[in-house]
Amino acid sequence: MSNEVYAFALDNALKEVKSVCPDLANTFIFDENYFTVAKDPDTPQEAINKAIDEFHLVKEKAEAIGGLETVTVQGSEGQVKISRINNFYLATAFSKEADEKFIGTLYGVLIPTVIKLVDQLQPDVPNDETPMTADPEPTQELIEQTYHEEAFEETQQFTLENVEPENVESESVETEYAEAEHEALEQPSFEEAAIIEEPTTEEQVEPIEDEQANASEDFEENGPVLPEPPVTQVIVESIGGLLIKSDTVRIDNSVISRWNDLYGDKTIQEVYLEALDGKTTRCKFKPIKDSKYEGKGVIQMPEKIQAALETSKGELVMVKPVVE
Amino acid sequence: MGKKKKSSAETETVLTEEDAAVIDLAEEPKVSSDLVKTLSKICKRKTVLGYIIRDASTATIDLKEPEKLVDYAMLTSQALESGQELSQLLAVGELKSTVIEGRDIKAVCMIIGESKISVFMKKSVDHADLLNSITQ
């Protein structure tokens, strides 16, 4: 889950706590990458940044005590406490008149609860702010999911080819059946499972990273804003056959998984395609099945779409997701 | 707990000698003997892992795991420095103590007079009680 979602919830939590604890001078929360996630409005960002830097300096040297979990600074007029809560660090500064136990208990209950609630609302999106890159080391679970998907589709195609080879309508039956099976198994969509596929080329990763950086800036200035859909340049490969939908292109798994990572719970079912001469079209997409095209920066495109774009095999087209 | 060494060498040089459990570098030790006595007494507890006392020219060290001396010294030095910065940044007054807690171990760092004191202990120890006995 992106930090923007946590930021909204935690910001409000900090404000509420401060309203009931007047002795609480400063509070802020930062993540493991030392980015400020939430803060009370009275604490200047510059002080927060410096405080995080100091914490970082101590943490760097804390391997001897098994990593750093809490720093408590006792001053003559109050206390600063930075403690780890889930994947975040909560920093509080309060005067010596403050009820330390009350504040500790309040935060100890409230912040984990807020984080857990946000997690439960959107549990299937990873919690990080790191640039979206393909996962080079797939987990066993994901490998198994993908195996089931592939095996299922292959079985389905085999059956259809043998029973109704000339029936073009069988394609939609295949899709519906596949979708129903996915729901029954409660597995992630093919696009999500596709995250395990080969990492993509650097040329494809860079635009995504830029988009993410822009999105992060936009959020700080204007609140949560969806990042601009990343544009990926790919080479056209022809695809055809009885079971190939004429309105669906096949795209590299790593590109699809980055879109999923970038947009979290947003639905991406279609893509915009643009040829170099400016012709555009919108169509459905599926991941590339043929492993020999994986990570090659290609798009498998039926003749009909090639005709619409006035493009052909070997030419470049731009592809970007339609985010709804 | 360990053998004692006396040397006129630089503090940094001596700190790398891993076999030294207790080191006193000063020609004329400035660290209060009462403080050392108190800390030595505290150190007899099973849950206390040792201490480091430093001032401008001397260091008194008593650690149950002397091989961790350099790591502990660097950590507590940074903890005191960062503690001072944090207390100024977030306006909580003059630094009294910094407590750093890891997964299993915690360290209490404080400045008494010219001496910088760091005491290492298991995380379960009530450091407030320990702080009281040092500052009394």
Image (cartoon, rainbow, N blue to C red):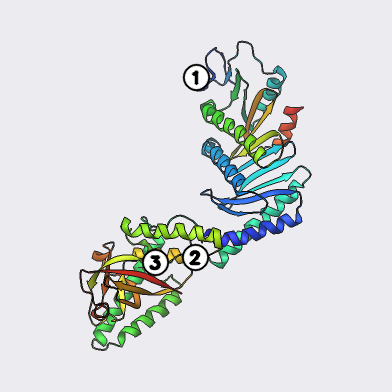
Discs 2 and 3 share one subunit: yes
Where disc 3 sits, the SS reads: helix
Q: Residue A129: horizontal and vertical position, in percent?
A: 48, 56
The quadrant where residue B1 appears: top right
Residue under numbered circle 2: A124
Q: Residue A168: horizontal and vertical position, in percent?
A: 27, 87
Direction front: furthest residue: A277
Q: Few, some or many C-alpha atoms within 10 Å of disc 1 (few <14, some 14-19, many ≥20)?
A: few
Task: Answer with left or right where residue A181 lies relative to residue A171.
Answer: right
Discs 2 and 1 share one subunit: no
Residue sitting at 74 percent across and 48 percent down? A101
Residue under numbered circle 3: A193
Looking at this view, is A223 or B5 the one in front?
A: A223
Q: Few, some or many C-alpha atoms within 10 Å of disc 2 (few <14, some 14-19, many ≥20)?
A: few
Discs 3 and 1 share one subunit: no
Task: Answer with left or right where residue A55 lies relative to residue A311.
Answer: right
Instruction: Say which chain tag 3 marks.
Output: A
- For marks 2 and 1, give the CA distance: 53 Å
Q: Are marks 3 and 1 in contact (CB under 8 Å)?
A: no
Amino acid of disc 2: Asp
Task: Answer with left or right where residue B13 lies relative to residue A191.
Answer: right
Residue under numbered circle 1: B13
Residue sitting at 55 percent across and 58 percent down? A220
Where disc 2 sits, the SS reads: loop
Q: Residue A312: horizontal and vertical position, in percent?
A: 21, 74
Where disc 1 sits, the SS reads: helix
Q: Does A60 appear above or below B25?
A: below
Q: Does A238 appear above or below B9?
A: below
Q: Earlier in the sequence, mark 2 or mark 3?
A: 2
